[in-house]
Amino acid sequence: MSANASSTATVAASGRRGQEPASSTVGHARMANAIRALAMDAVEQAKSGHPGMPMGMADVATVLFTQFLKFDPADATWPDRDRFVLSAGHGSMLIYALLYLTGYPAMTIDEIKRFRQLGSITAGHPEYGHTPGVETTTGPLGQGLANAVGMAIAERHLAAAFGDAVVNHKTYVIASDGDLMEGISHEAIALAGHLKLNKLIVLFDDNGISIDGALSLTDSVDQVKRFEACGWSASRIDGHDPAAIAAAIANAQKSDRPVLIACKTKIGYGAPTKVGKASAHGSPLGAEEIKGARDNLAWEHAAFDVPADVLAAWREAGARSKGVHAEWSKRLAALDAGQRAEFERRIKGDLPKALNDAVRQVKETLAATPKDIATRSSSEFALEALVPAVPEMVGGSADLTGSNNTRTKSMQAITAADFSGRFIHYGVREHGMAAAMNGMALHGGIIPYSGTFLVFSDYCRPAIRLAALMGIRVIHVMTHDSIGLGEDGPTHQPVEQLAALRAIPNLLVFRPADAVETIECWQLALEHKNRPSVLALTRQNLPQLRRALDTENRCAAGAYEIAPADGKVDVSLFATGSEVSLAIEAQKLLAAKGVSARVVSVPCFELLAEAPEAARRAVIGSARVNVGVEAAVRQGWDAVIGSAGAFIGMSSFGASAPYKELYKKFGITPEAIAEAALENLR
Ligand SMILES: Cc1ncc(C[n+]2csc(CCOP(=O)(O)OP(=O)(O)O)c2C)c(N)n1
């Protein structure tokens, strides 16, 4: 601290000289101390927050933002900006201070003063879409790091498609001990190392402190060795030595593999008694400690007061990349007009016109030659048309490619040597995959879709939740969606996963009943630009129920009558996916007993819930008896069938056996559906 304080004093005394940039006269220490002061003042005012990490990483962040990061506060969405991910989102005041100091117009000092208050853009943890300049929502540790891997993949893929002249940027991450302790970090760094993502640079806040105290309580991993073992270049530096930080980041620019820089720092740097202690992590320092920190740092300014010369130096740093931005705009303008339009379309996230033709073509083929196949195969059939029509789709699977049917015949794999492919073998890394998909969507220019078994949605859930919170378009193909997968048994048979996914706000959960619904659900997932989707698909074959050409997307309503009643309606049978055909069989059994039933397919609960009230009421109808059918738990179904409705589904885990036997054992049969209807009519 003393070195910092004395250099601060010298620089402060020297004032501005001639035409030199403000930053060279103000000096590193005062610029970094501006971050420290804003962080401790904002946390103090909010009476909550995390001052320690921003104070500890202020030196690293200052070097990065003043010397390396390519960004333009006037255009937070400039496609070729470097991405900066604050994976340790609890240190949000670090990024808010940086956005304010470098001159993002929305980030005013008043917003800093309103840290963590309702309606401010300075939420407790950084939120994408809420704060210009925040690239991804972080807070759940490990997610940001894994998002960054997706961003770095997206950068290489788009560079392969459009050339380095328009896509050529780095992805920087600040990650903490907590980020690196989380399991997802391992999936992410292993994938990054394997793909040799050399433009990914992680600055690790190696402060040896977490909430419970010293890291030695819980962890003895040598992170440098661990990253090296995963194919990274890794080194250790003093995270308070600006020259060492700059040298390490400069070195990283030339790496042929991803780079970890472990920056030895002191949490709460500057605080007299809390420095280096867990007590600096997550609560206001208190007036005494703040006063002591101001003395230590020779920061004599009032709370929230950044002196004009320091602010000018920071604003200058914020304007550093303007020339580079202008050059980039020229290069973009010089692209062939078609290429440029395509690049701009993809970055905007608009779909190509060819999508509608592709959907129509699939429907025409299905009408001409119906397919009684599993919906996972219907999805593959749909993808054979969609993938060529929508070039921004990048598929993948977590080592279940042949089961998820997500790779079409023409797709090449993305490899370290060639990023032009459109399929990613994510390996057995569902969580890392889902978070990387978020990173790709956030980067822009890509619609990621990928595959695993529905039961492993639990392994993806934290990332799916964040995709829903951020409102980004990622599409999860999740096959083997019920006991219908059969012999693999209850470990692999989802029972509660549909309900659990439906509980996530803003997520669309589709469960198509046949090949026609599958292409319709794919279309909807693609068209919903601001929300993620899950397509729950079967392993077992299903009859194609809609055999006549129907160009309307019936699934868009969330539910529709797939088999009307004959005459007045006694019973409404509601079903999803593989159980719709069972409901149609039950309808026949009921008809034989003189009971008239209608069958409603419910491919998407969320779209049904959001449908106009009249349409929703009409499709739900007013039969004396409602029966819901889904080979899963009842939770969530009352919204469709009412609490008095009967439900045919699962109330326990499944079992290992051929699937037809399982449907009988668990009573999910046309006979059981008909019986439930009759019983409720009595
Ligand atoms: C997945 C997840 N688990 C737990 C938390 C709560 N949490 C916030 S920070 C933190 C650990 C703090 O240690 P570190 O990451 O080293 O940050 P530092 O103390 O250095 O700021 C924890 C457990 C979280 N944000 N995310």
Image (cartoon, grey):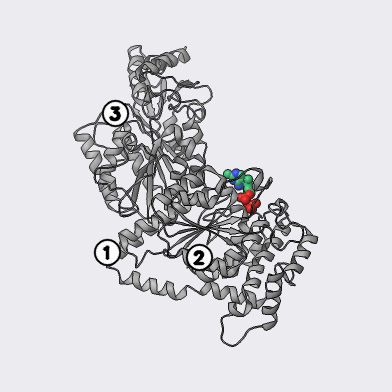
In the picture, the disc for residue 126 is none
Circle 2 SS class: helix
Extreme-left residue of the structure: 368
Q: Amino acid at mark 1?
A: Gly
Q: Amino acid at mark 2?
A: Ile
Q: Left or right: where does residue 574 sit relative to residue 286? A: left
Residue under numbered circle 2: 249
In the picture, the disc for residue 545 is 3
Q: Earlier in the sequence, mark 1 or mark 3?
A: 1
Bin the neighbour count of mark 3 within 10 Å (Cα to Cα): few under 14, some 14-19, many 20 and up. some
- Number of the front mark, 1 or 3: 1
The answer to whether residue 484 shows anywhere in this view is yes
Circle 1 SS class: helix
The image quadrant that residue 671 belongs to is top left
Q: Residue 203 or 46: which is nearer the viewer?
A: 203
Q: Left or right: where does residue 382 sit relative to residue 294? A: left
Residue under numbered circle 1: 338
Tell me the quadrant of the picture where the N terminus can be found: bottom right
- Percent position (x, y) of residue 573? 41, 23
Check if mark 1's residue and mark 3's residue have beta carbons within 8 Å.
Answer: no
Q: Residue 24 or 381: which is nearer the viewer?
A: 24
Q: Residue 85 or 464: which is nearer the viewer?
A: 85
Q: Earlier in the sequence, mark 2 or mark 3?
A: 2
The image quadrant that residue 268 belongs to is bottom right
Extreme-bottom residue of the structure: 18
Q: Amino acid at mark 3?
A: Leu
Q: How many marks?
A: 3
